[in-house]
Structures are given as structure tokens and as C-alpha cells.
Image (cartoon, rainbow, N blue to C red):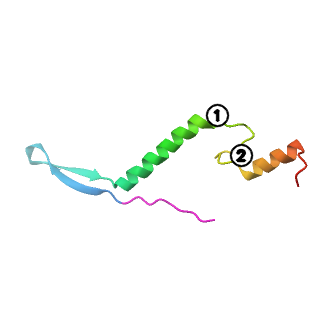
Amino acid sequence: MHSVEFQFTPARFKEIPIAKGKIRTLSITSPRDTHKIVQKAIGVILEAAYEPLFSKHSFGFIPTKSTLDALSEIKLRGAGFT
């Protein structure tokens, strides 16, 4: 099984002059990183909204269920599959 991990790129820092001759450091994140964070947040929201609508017999693409759960369901119901 191939696994891919997301690697954040380091933020860029820019020094900005402010009142009384002081300097404030501003961090600028990569747009690519922001995109991944927004994608994940939308996924979490959609999952919470649609998860309750799935049938209790659905096993595909549901994070809390697995292939083994589906096989156990078939065995418990005596569907005659081997």
C-alpha cells in the first residue's frame, strides 16, 4: 500500500515597519498549504452532513466501516456467500 504525506512548505517572513520605528514580522503561508487546509475542512463538514443519511448497510467510502465489517454483515445474515 502506498502512502503519501502532505509536507507543509515553510512560511515566508516579511518585516514590516510600524509606528515609532518598530518592526513587525508578518508570516506568509504558501497558497498550496492554504488550499489543502480548506479542502480538509470542507471534507469534514460534508462528511458530518451526509454520514447520517447513508444506509446502515452501506460500507463503501465510510471512514468508520471496513471490508471486514461488510464480510461480517454478510456472514451474520446467512446470505450464502463463501
For label 2, the SS is loop
Tell which circle, 2 or 1, labels the residue nearer the N-terminal end.
1
> Residue tagged by mark 2?
59
Q: Residue furthest left?
A: 20
Residue beneath the point at 19% across and 54% down: 15
Residue 6 to residue 17: above or below: below
Magenta part of the chain = 1-9
Give the image location of residue 20, x and y in percent.
8, 44
Where is the C terminus found, in terms of image quarters? bottom right
Q: Amino acid at mark 2?
A: Phe
Q: Which mark is residue 52?
A: 1
Q: Compare residues 44 and 54 and report the one nearer the observer.
A: 54
Residue 1, by quadrant, is bottom right
Q: Say left or right for 27 vs 37.
A: left
Q: Say left or right for 41 vs 66.
A: left
Give the image location of residue 68, x and y in percent.
76, 52
For label 1, the SS is helix
Q: Main SS of the magenta segment?
A: loop
